Structures are given as structure tokens and as C-alpha cells.
Image (cartoon, rainbow, N blue to C red):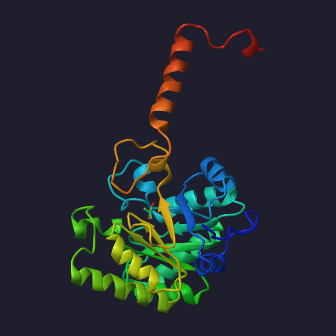
Amino acid sequence: MSAVIENKSKKVTTHGFMEMKQRGEKISMLTSYDYSLARIVDGAGIDAILVGDSASNVMAGWDTTLPITLDQMIYHGASVARAVKRALVVVDLPFGTYQGNSDEALRSAIRVMKETTADAIKIEGGEEILDSVRRILSAGIPVMGHLGLTPQAIHKFGTYAVRAQEEAEAQKLLNDVHLLEDAGCFSIVLEKIPAKLAAKAASETRIPIIGIGAGNAVDGQVLVLHDMLGITNEFSPRFLRRYHHLYEEISGAVGNYIRDVKSSDFPNEKEQY
Ligand code: KIV
């Protein structure tokens, strides 16, 4: 394995993102929604942080990503951007802030960039949102695309099952990948699609393809931080690798605290004034 890993103290830019693909360095990306965890994730050397609208599920407890608002995404984005020194920070435009109206899309993206100081925005969809993509790009705002399973369209899909297994949907996805690349997107997330299709997309594009449930033959991977740390313990899709079991660890620590308070063990003499 001889992939060169670049200087880990240099700020990651969208340009640097594309250079990583050119030199064959895989891109690591995780979500974060708050200052404290973003500080840890950035300090550990992650290449990119996604302030995903999965905050709607993870932080707010909604069933879907649809309820989160632009103001709430801006709050999360600004909290993360304040913590980050090196990683590229990408903020999701939430449902209803860019579809079908490129003026509104541009206004939403400008608000995110001004009020969070993030580096880029991400939006879901292909041909049907191309006007919005072009409009945002024309203002000099870098755009990351998102195709395959696009959770903001869950009510259209009806299920979170693997997408693009049929030929017609696979062809549309590849077509959308090329449209987004040609429009000027700097990268595209492909979520929950067959690994072979994702590999084809990555081999046919110059921009990095970041996978989540899209196999290994892409240019990088993204996971939801709370899932890979095991803070959420009810969500176990096949693509998720858990690196920790924090639900149990936090629950155990809270249990110990309750025990110590109830038994008057906490605080002891050294823990008081
Ligand atoms: O919102 C999010 O966390 C995402 C990732 C699943 C890619 O879009």
C-alpha cells in the first residue's frame, strides 16, 4: 500500500479533495453536529466533516431528515466550523430549501456560507435539481452532490432499501453523476447502491466519489459519527462498522454516578471546598 498521505496539518480544501483522488489517497469523512465532538474528530485527522441533516434523526430524534430547518442546520454548522482547524466542512442544505426554486437554493446556500463559515454545501438529487446546483456554483459556493438513497426523498421511495439495483435506475444514477460533475460539483456522495455501480461511477469521474454503503472501490467513505461510535444502538445496516459501543459505556458511567450520589459516596472530601 503506497498511497501517499499528505501533510496532516494543512487545511483541506475542495481543490485538495480532488488532488487526493488524483494521487489515490482515500478520503475519510464523518458527520459532526456540535463543537465538542467536531474538535475531537478534527484533531484525530479526519479529512472532511459533514454537518449532515441526519442531525434531524441523531440530535433531534425525528424519524426522518425532513423536519430539520435551515436555521437549525446553520446552528449546527457554525458550532462545527468553530471547532475545526483542518478538515473540510460541508453542510447539508435541508429539505425544502433548494428543490424546485434556484433563487431560494442560492439564498439558502449563501446563508449557510455566511453564517457558518463552512467550506461547502451538499444537496441531494441529480437532473431535477441541476438549476439549483448551477446557481449555487455560479456564486462561487462549492457543491457536493448526493445520489442513490437520498433520505430527503424517503416518502417517494417508501423504504430505506438499496437503490439503483434495476438497470433503468442505475443508468439514471450514472447519468446524474456525469451531470453533476459537468456542472462543477467538487465531489458526490453515493449512498446505499450496489458496489459495482459505485465503482463504475468512481472510475468514470475525475471528482471524488464518497461512498456510504457503496463498497470499497470508491474514493472515500463517510459514516454518521454517532452510528460508528455506537451511541445510536438500534440502527445496524450491513454497511455500518461500529468502532465503539458508547451507548453501553455512557449508560454504565451514568449508572455509576447515580450509585455514588445515592450512597453519598460522591462528592468526597477532596471533591469539595
Ligand atoms: O446527513 C447525513 O449524515 C448524510 C450522510 C449519510 C451521507 O447525508
- Residue at 55 percent of width and 86 percent of height: 137
Check the image and report above or below for 153 versus 175.
Answer: above
**Observer able to see residue 272:** no
Q: Nearer the viewer, residue 270 or 234?
A: 234
**205 horizontally vs 23: left or right:** left
Question: In percent of the image, x 62 and y 64: which residue is there?
Answer: 47
Q: In this view, does 109 lie to the left or right of 164?
A: right
Is residue 84 toward the left or the right of residue 196 in the image? right
Q: Where is residue 203 in the image (x, y as percent from the top left)?
A: 45, 83
Q: Which of 37 and 67 is in front in this view?
A: 37
Q: In which quarter of the image is residue 199?
A: bottom left
Q: Which of 196 and 222 is in front in this view?
A: 196
State whether residue 11 appears in this view. yes
Check the picture and name the quadrant holding the N terminus: bottom right
Q: Which residue lies furthest to the bottom in this view?
A: 182
- Please, which residue is most extreme toward the right here? 273
**Residue at horizontal 66 percent and vertical 51 percent from the top:** 39
* Vertical arrangement, residue 196 with respect to residue 158, above or below: below
Could you tell me residue 33's position as x and y percent? 54, 54
- Using residue 7 as the reference point, say whether residue 205 is left or right of it: left
The C terminus, quarter of image: top right
Q: Residue most toward the front?
A: 1
Which residue is found at the position 52% from the left and 83% from the top?
185
Q: Where is residue 220 in the image (x, y as percent from the top left)?
A: 52, 68
| Number of on-image labels | 0
* Residue 100 on image: x %, y %: 36, 82
Q: Quadrant of ligand 1?
A: bottom left
